[in-house]
Image: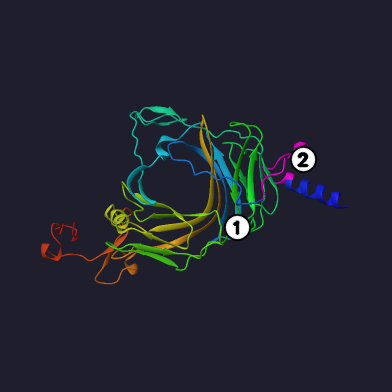
Amino acid sequence: MKRRIFLVFVAGLCMAAGAVACDDEKKIVEPPFEQDPALITLHFPCTEDLRIGGFQVQTNEDMGYTAVDGVVRDGIVPGQIPEVALTEGDCRLLGRRNLFCDPACNPGFTCGFEETCVPMPLGQDMGTVVLRGLVERVALKALQPGSSYSYTQLPHPGFEVNHVIQLRTTSGFLGPLELYGVGVSQLVPTTSAWTLAAGQDLIIEWTPPPEGARSRILIELNIDQHGLTPLNMSCNLPDTGSATIPAVIVDALIAAGVTGYPTGRVTRRTEDSFTSTQGCIDFFVTSVRTMTVQVAGHTPCTSQDDCTPPEVCDLDPMIQQCYTPCSGPEDCTPPATCNAENKCE
């Protein structure tokens, strides 16, 4: 009876989108893998200049779901490698790399580092990707077009805290490989919003994980939604329950521009990676939340009702910020002056 129930379960799994065909499933012979999270080896995530893709098991705490997704390409995408504007401790300010090719690249090509068109890297078939250690075993085949991988039928949460999770392939673009993660505890920030203020450190706190956890914390901020040269903040931090973002990072981020509605995200994750001659892929097991972000002295708006008089809303889609109109240069702080639109600049 137990064997019959198991076969029915496997058949149901095989019918899911992207899952392995049942005949293939029967042929898989899997070796045991390490179950003690303290004994597995985890590697640092890929650097942007080597990363050709990766996989993640994401528990989205805002939406209440757990999903698996990933893609591996046959090269790096030049425009996706950020420029590092500033590094301070575990935090970096990253700028978008603006590559310009003239004439514009044809379909199937992208602008390269030398600003000449190069073939656009394409998603590659990694063979059957098997994940064990989740609440249920998942076996996926590449989805077309694009050779991406996706599975959204896991219960939520899709793993137990401190359980080892193995991602394994037996063939495909990079051949056989194994990557590991550990089930992370639910990320719970202790505040509902982050407020950035010029000249001040940003203190961020969250509920710490159980002792011995292998996780780290990734904090991402974008306060310049419409800027021509926006900077994003990215901090990869120890998962201790608190972190201090230095004022030098906060000041540089604000100075680069504040437009639109700021966004923030905090992720608890374990990190692993695999490097070959083709490039680097990584594997994350995550608990992620979006955060409300405020910038002192800046109020985002999409209508005049969002601003408190005498402030008015700059409805320019590239700005979307409240401001106080000026009537003359005396209303502005030098070297700014009052322009024809009654704005200090």
Say which residue appears at 55% left-offset and 35% top-offset.
123
The quadrant holding residue 283 is top right
Relative to residue 9, is residue 242 drawn left or right?
Answer: left
Relative to residue 251, is residue 61 drawn left or right?
Answer: right
124, above or below 237, in the image: above
Residue at the far front: name it. 39
Mark 2: which secondary structure? helix
Q: Which residue is mark 1?
A: 65
Say which residue appears at 77% left-offset and 46% top-offset.
10
Relative to residue 132, is residue 264 drawn left or right?
Answer: left
The span shown in magenta is 14-35
Give x and y (percent) for residue 244: 38, 60
Q: Residues within 10 Å of mark 2 (few under 14, many from 20)?
A: some
8 vs 276, nearest the viewer: 276
Query: Mark 2 or 1 closer to N-term?
Result: 2
Is residue 23 inside the magenta stretch? Answer: yes
76 vs 177, nearest the viewer: 177
What kind of residue is marked 1? Answer: Tyr
Relative to residue 59, is residue 135 drawn left or right?
Answer: right
Give x and y (percent) for residue 286: 55, 53
Q: Which residue is mark 2?
A: 22
Mark number displayed over residue 53? none
Say which residue appears at 64% left-offset and 45% top-offset.
166
